[in-house]
Image: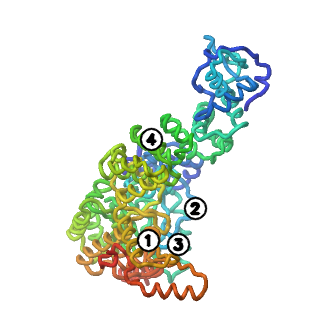
Amino acid sequence: MVNIDNIRGVAHQKVELASIDDFPGPYCMSFGFDLGPLVRSLEGAGLLNPPLLTGDENGRFTIVAGYRRIKALKQMKVDTATCRIIPVNEIPPAECLLMNLYDNLAVRELNPVEKGMALTRLNCWFSTEEIVDQYMALLGLPPNRATLSSYLRFEEKMEIQAKEAVALGRLSFRNAMLLADLDPVSRSALVDLMSNLKFTISQQAHIIDYVTDLALIEGETIPEVLSDSRVRAIVGDSLMNKPQKGRRLISYLRRRRMPRLSKAEKDFRKVVADLNLDKMVRIEHSPFFESPFYRLEVLFRDGQSLREKLEKLMSEDLEKIGDPWKDNGRGD
Amino acid sequence: MAGGIKKIVVEQGAERFPSTGAILLSVGDVPVSRARGQMQDMVQGTNTDMGKDTLHLLSYAGEFLKPCPGTRNYICCGYLILNVGTNCPLDCSYCILQAYFNLPNLRVHVNLEQEIDRVFEAIDREPEKIFRVGTGEFTDSLALDPVTGWSGIIVERFSMRKNTVLELKTKTANTRALLESTCRDRIIVSWSLNSPFICATEEHGAAALKKRLEAARECRAAGFTLGFHFDPMIPHRDWKDGYRRTVDLLDRYIEPGGIIWISMGSFRFMPALKPIIRRRHRDTCVLDGEFIKGLDGKMRYFKPIRIELYSFLRELLSQWHPDMGLYLCMESHEVWLESMSWSPETTEGLCGYLDQRVRKFFDLCG
């Protein structure tokens, strides 16, 4: 646990910002943040809460808490700032880490990248049981080893580009983990795609699934699949917005990955379209045709209109409706 | 298989069972460690070896006889699983156990001998019912037999039950202990078969196809009733030619009259298995097909592909012998009709059909 008395009396001191490390270091867990609001706050009110640092014998400082404040001050080209300095070896590193964790959790929720950073740092000082039992719930994560393992793996394997996509919400953490086993070049190609187009979480999963499958089945690399002329044409089509491009791309990749199912769906749609159904009448197949049953939906205002719609429906060539993959001509 | 065991873990409480001593003796000079309780759960899919070199002896506190975890919307064979252990020393790329259990190691339930009476109590309570029991669902029935002596523990006792058949399903040729036993009544020895390509490239650690068939022939010659399971069927390049070659081999090695049943099933899996297979078996072709999410939430081939697989193999097997006890594993009424030209319609219907096969092959009255 953090002993707050340990830092109550620490000295305030003017510190040259150039002597503070630029990197998050062993205690900080901030990633993918926008410095703008903090810069505006510092410009308006100054540094109200001095960062907490620990120094070494060479006069260099490591941030224990206040990483974003230091970053903002450096961006503002400030040379010095008042900080609280913990003397060397005065407070154990695990306690410094917890100070940072609680300092952050008190004011905001960490994004998934930051949770990975936090767990990776906790993993250096605490047992797996302690992390699972005491800290995962604090981070808003299910307290189990599988989740811990995923976050540690994410932090270890993912490049900055993928982490940024996750921190900015362009790629979900779960989908990012689907990329963890890919080589960095393939991962980068997919992250680029996710960052350039706009996909829902389920679309992201589909894209990753189709592209990795196609690469393996067709003996191509993932970048090769993604540089296919059809893919490039969709991504580069200036007449579509990003969500439209995303849907079109998924549709194309799905047709390529599932040719028989896609053909059956297309053939079925054609049969139904040829029936000249009333706008309020719909005929649909089950998901993937797995159920043997088809579905008829009729919207009507009253019995009279229902009769009219059904009579019109009955006059159509309904025998054409059937399993479109069968060789009986019904689907053609 | 003992050669593949590099470690043994003995869980607290397992030491007092005779099976533990017998297993420790049979494996010889293998390091043994003690575990106080449940081993830490395996983080699913991240542990690449799954403890396949570690024999884990434990006293199992759960039910030893369980219904096959069939899924709704599809017709199940109604098989009962005798839970002798979990996980398997073979390493088939398509194996659902990779995602099914979250505990590592080859887990052997050393209290089987003591608990089996409870199983028979349940069976004896329903003397009119036929129980089809097997050990090949959560592990291979014979892969660990040289070490665990499972067949020695259960075969004789099951053979004495008049309303029960025991099916031992394997991809190995570990039949020595079986052949040394004198029990044949109501014991079925079954082999999982596939195309030569799938056997060679996806069933890592399993016996070669011909070895399996040689072992089957030997068991048949020794008086055992045989079963075969083409499950999972997997369409791959030249799959028709591949399955035809397997049926040709069956014809060469096996006399069909001794076969109680042959099942067919196509590859299906929980979605969580896919990333595990990708991670553990990078060169696999088992994920190449067109999979859709089935009515039970599992991934399975698009329906016409399944129908094509079954229809093709049914035709071959029917040409070989007209009365094979062919059935489909976890398929819909519609797929049955399309590929087999008949359907048991329900799980009860399929159970009835398989029970009839049991009656045809075995004396159930004593």
Q: Is residue B110 left or right of residue A265?
A: right
N-term-proximal mark, 1 vs 4: 4
Callout 1 secondary element: loop
Q: Quadrant of the C terminus of chain B?
A: bottom left
- Disc 3 residue crowd, few under 14, some 14–19, many 20+, Cα 10 Å: some
Residue B62, numbered label:
2
Placement of B185 over or under A3, stated as above or below: below
Residue B235 x/y as whole percent: 31, 62
Q: CA distance from mark 2 to mark 1?
A: 35 Å
Taking the spot 47% from the left edge, 47% from the top edge, the residue there is A197
Q: CA distance from mark 3 to mark 2?
A: 16 Å
Q: Are marks 1 and 3 in contact (CB under 8 Å)?
A: no
Taking the spot 37% from the left edge, 65% from the top edge, the residue there is A261
Relative depth, front residue between A260 and B69:
A260
Q: Which chain is home to disc 3?
A: B
Residue A149 x/y as whole percent: 54, 42
Q: Which chain is home to disc 4?
A: A
- Disc 2 residue crowd, few under 14, some 14–19, many 20+, Cα 10 Å: few
Q: Which chain is home to disc 2?
A: B
Q: What's the amino acid at mark 3?
A: Phe
Residue A192, numbered label:
4
Residue A290, numbered label:
1
Which label lies toward us, 1 or 3?
1
Residue B259 x/y as whole percent: 31, 75
Taking the spot 51% from the left edge, 71% from the top edge, the residue there is B72
Residue beneath disc 3 = B120
Colour mapping used in the image: rainbow
Q: What's the amino acid at mark 2?
A: Gly
Q: Is residue B189 shown to the viewer in this render? A: no
Quarter of the rendering containing residue B345? bottom left
Quarter of the rendering containing residue A119? top right
Q: CA distance from mark 2 to mark 4?
A: 49 Å
